[in-house]
Amino acid sequence: MNTNLLRKYAALVVRVGVNLQEDQPLVIHAPITCADFVHALAAEGYCAGAHDVAVNW
């Protein structure tokens, strides 16, 4: 999948769907086959102000 599209979708999920606020933790549960998207979600989580991002594969 297009990397730019993954980043845009991750921004939509984190900022609108999850409505992550500054200093909140972000926990992501995903299969390893979604690694590229999980990396985009984690990066967007930190950009949105998450103090910690945990990934459970």
Image (cartoon, rainbow, N blue to C red):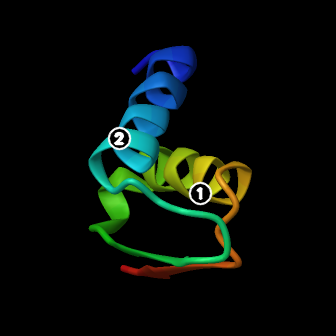
Q: What's the mark number on residue 16?
A: 2
Q: Is residue 9 above or below residue 4?
A: below
Q: Is residue 36 above or below residue 26?
A: above
Q: Which residue corresponds to the image point at 49% horizontal and 35% vertical from the top-left?
A: 11
Q: What residue would you read off at disc 1?
A: 45
Quadrant of the drawing holding the C terminus: bottom left
**Which label sits in the foreground, 1 or 2?**
2
Q: Nearer the viewer, residue 43 or 17?
A: 17
Residue at 54% over, 29% down: 7
Viewer-nearest residue: 50 or 33 = 50
In the rendered view, does 14 fall on the left or right side of 7? left
What kind of residue is marked 1?
Answer: Gly
Question: Secondary structure under badge 1?
Answer: helix
Kindly identify the residue that appears in the image at 43 percent across and 49 percent down. Answer: 14
Q: In which quarter of the view is residue 40 placed? A: top right
Find residue 42 and report its horizontal and vertical position in percent. 58, 59
Decide: few, some or many residues near mark 2? Use Cα within 10 Å; few <14, some 14-19, many ≥20. Answer: few
Q: Which mark is residue 29?
A: none
Sequence-first tag of 1 and 2: 2
How many labels were placed on the picture? 2
Residue 54: percent from left, percent from top: 53, 82
Residue 21's x, y, as percent? 54, 63
Q: Above or below — where is 5 with respect to 29?
A: above
Marks 2 and 1: in contact by CB < 8 Å?
no
Quadrant, the N terminus: top left
Question: Is disc 1 surrounded by few (<14), some (14 to 19) or many (20+) residues within 10 Å?
Answer: many
Q: CA distance from mark 1 to mark 2?
A: 12 Å
